[in-house]
Image (cartoon, rainbow, N blue to C red):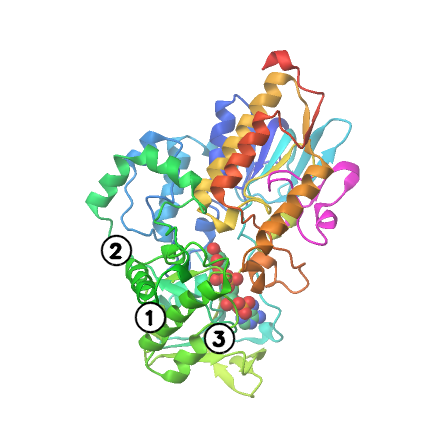
């Protein structure tokens, strides 16, 4: 236990995941004082909480890592092509130690209120440990998929067994050996967890509301030659990745799917399927744009499901049909569809028989069946992108609550700042590419942009920076326009807020592409922060 801290800093950072850690490092470099608050008792954010069996990153290890330190990227060795959660968490801890970050982080401390003090032109940040910190700037590094969501199913409290959420997996692990396990949900988390749970459990019952497209990862131990190839060319590759649509370096075919013969198309899809991972969606340049092109890729994956799953009824139930492939986040798996060939795995199609209630002995569906279970795993996702921000109790100018401002969906300028909330930045906030990208690339871009901005403000004597209403409105309109050119809004996805009852349906991330977005951000900065109100106006001589 520590006494509450009453103090003043230049900057408060909320969150010690990959965003918060790098932000702190950059702030130190600028000579700014900073306090970081983190709810967990360790660093790592997403990778601290998501310890469910099979948790793994679906961006390749050589790319899902920081690029800011040449020494760091050279010295670190990733054991697998796609990193497992424990390895990524080990890396986060290594970074925290290597750059001596922990001394400025207050762990096991949740921010409860973030309020703008108009007269002082400072933020007052309060925590559940009684801390009261004022700071000129507040930077929210709270993550996009950090507010785990338990569905509101009647009878939950009556269940006699154990319940778990994939996003809050117990740190000591869970022994599921021989037990009857119900898994609710079939998103990325469930698709990774189910094959691993099935190997331990006595029986697994999967409750599927919406089937998902999933591509095999082809994960394997890191190949030394491949690692060296990356390390000997790291700088150039990182630079190139930043220009890519989603911040990942892979081969994006510059042809449209309908420009080639069916035979060529199938060959390309087959090669991508064999290659593994989300590069499948880069097989053609118009899969996210053109419904007919998209259907060819979706048909290919449905055919794969049919060929893998031996029971035709199960195969049929597992095939997604009512949204274009990729418009709900594409999943990456190891033996997901194969797992349904096991004798100890059954599938309940909730489109036919929805869950009615949780009963003391298991999950009851509308046909009256109680699917008995000793444990229920909720793989039911997150209040994505806005959930954690809105939980922090942020109030801007005139006491305006962010929750009120965003009542009809998030609005921001560049996903970096919000009109009415001066000197408050959001790392990978809604309105930026964030969840549509390699998070590491997007995090580093935002942190660097914010750090450069703070340096500029310091050098030019500017006390406050705030997005103008016009710039914000234009950015929101632009974001919607770009999204509507794609097939994405056709799916009831968490990108749209559709997984949370009552949440406004707004396409939240910016889909214009990581490379394009970065250029825009840089251009805006180069023009003296166009679209932002700087007060007092920058003393030009100081720059
Ligand atoms: P997701 O992708 O939001 O998946 C949640 C799953 O849970 C999804 O299949 C949902 O079905 C299902 N769900 C949610 N609520 C219910 C209820 N009430 N009943 C039945 N099924 C339900 O979360 P994940 O954790 O898998 O992945 C999130 C991201 O983390 C992932 O994209 C990666 O970026 C990492 P639905 O589709 O809503 O019908």
Check if mark 1's residue and mark 2's residue have beta carbons within 8 Å.
no
Q: Which mark is residue 220?
A: 2
User: Most extreme residue toward the top, as rendered?
Assistant: 541
Describe residue 62's horizontal placement relative to residue 41 as left or right.
left
Rounded to the nearest whole Å, what is the CA distance between mark 2 and mark 3? 29 Å
Q: Does mark 3's beta carbon lie closer than 8 Å to ligand 1?
A: yes
- Tag 3 residue: 207
- Residue 91 horizontal/vertical position (percent): 36, 42
Q: Quadrant of residue 266?
A: bottom left
The residue lying toward the viewer, choosing from 489 and 209, is: 489
Q: Quadrant of residue 301?
A: bottom left
Considering the numbered disc 1 on the image, is that residue within a helix, a strand or a loop? helix
Q: Earlier in the sequence, mark 1 or mark 2?
A: 1
Residue appearing at x 44%, y 62% in the figure: 189
- Tag 1 residue: 200
Asked if residue 214 shows in the view, the reply is yes
Q: Is residue 259 above or below residue 77?
A: below
């Amino acid at each position: 236990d520590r006494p509450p801290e009453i103090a003043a800093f230049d900057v408060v950072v909320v969150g010690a995941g990959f965003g918060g850690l790098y932000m702190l490092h950059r702030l130190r470099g600028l000579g700014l004082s900073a306090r970081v608050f983190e709810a967990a008792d360790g660093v790592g954010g997403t990778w601290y909480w998501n310890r469910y069996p099979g948790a793994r990153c679906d961006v390749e290890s050589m790319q899902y890592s920081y690029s800011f330190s040449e020494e760091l990227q050279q010295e670190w060795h990733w054991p697998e092509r796609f990193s497992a959660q424990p390895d990524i968490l080990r890396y986060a801890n290594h970074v925290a130690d290597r750059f001596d970050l922990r001394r400025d982080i207050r762990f096991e401390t949740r921010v409860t209120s973030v309020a703008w003090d108009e007269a002082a032109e400072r933020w007052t940040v309060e925590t559940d440990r009684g801390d009261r910190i004022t700071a000129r700037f507040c930077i929210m590094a709270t993550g996009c998929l950090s507010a785990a969501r338990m569905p509101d199913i009647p009878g939950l409290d009556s269940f006699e067994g154990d319940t778990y959420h994939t996003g809050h997996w117990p740190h000591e692990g869970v022994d599921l050996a021989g037990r009857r396990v119900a898994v609710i949900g079939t998103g990325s988390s469930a698709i990774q967890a189910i094959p691993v749970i099935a190997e331990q459990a006595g029986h697994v019952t999967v409750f599927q509301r919406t089937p998902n497209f999933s591509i095999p990862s082809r994960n394997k131990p890191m190949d030394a030659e491949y690692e060296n190839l990356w390390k000997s060319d790291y700088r150039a590759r990182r630079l190139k990745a930043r220009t890519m649509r989603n911040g990942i370096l892979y081969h994006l075919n510059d042809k449209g799917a309908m420009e080639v013969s069916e035979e060529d198309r199938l060959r390309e899809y087959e090669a991508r399927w064999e290659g593994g991972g989300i590069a499948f969606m880069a097989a053609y340049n118009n899969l996210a744009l053109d419904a007919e092109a998209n259907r060819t890729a979706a048909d290919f994956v449905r055919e794969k499901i049919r060929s893998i799953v031996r029971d035709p009824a199960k195969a049929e139930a597992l095939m997604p049909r009512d949204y274009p492939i990729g418009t709900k986040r594409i999943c990456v798996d190891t033996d997901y569809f194969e797992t349904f060939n096991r004798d100890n795995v059954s599938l309940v199609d909730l489109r036919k028989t929805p869950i009615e209630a949780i009963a003391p002995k298991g999950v009851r569906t509308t046909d009256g069946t109680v699917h008995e279970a000793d444990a229920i795993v909720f793989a039911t996702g997150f209040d994505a992108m806005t959930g954690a921000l809105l939980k922090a109790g942020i109030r801007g100018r005139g006491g305006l609550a962010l929750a009120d401002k965003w009542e009809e969906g998030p609005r921001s300028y560049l996903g970096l700042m919000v009109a009415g909330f001066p000197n408050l930045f959001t790392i990978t906030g809604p309105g930026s590419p964030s969840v549509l990208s390699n998070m590491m690339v997007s995090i580093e871009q935002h942190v660097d942009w914010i750090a450069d901005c703070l340096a500029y403000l310091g050098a030019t004597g500017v006390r406050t920076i705030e997005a103008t209403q016009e710039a914000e409105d234009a950015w929101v309109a632009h974001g919607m326009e770009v999204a509507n050119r794609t097939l994405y809004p056709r799916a009831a996805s968490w990108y749209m807020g559709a997984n949370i009852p009552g949440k406004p349906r707004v396409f939240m991330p910016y889909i214009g592409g990581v490379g394009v977005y970065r250029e825009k951000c840089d251009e805006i900065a180069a023009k003296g922060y166009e679209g932002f109100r700087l007060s007092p106006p920058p003393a030009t001589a100081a720059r």
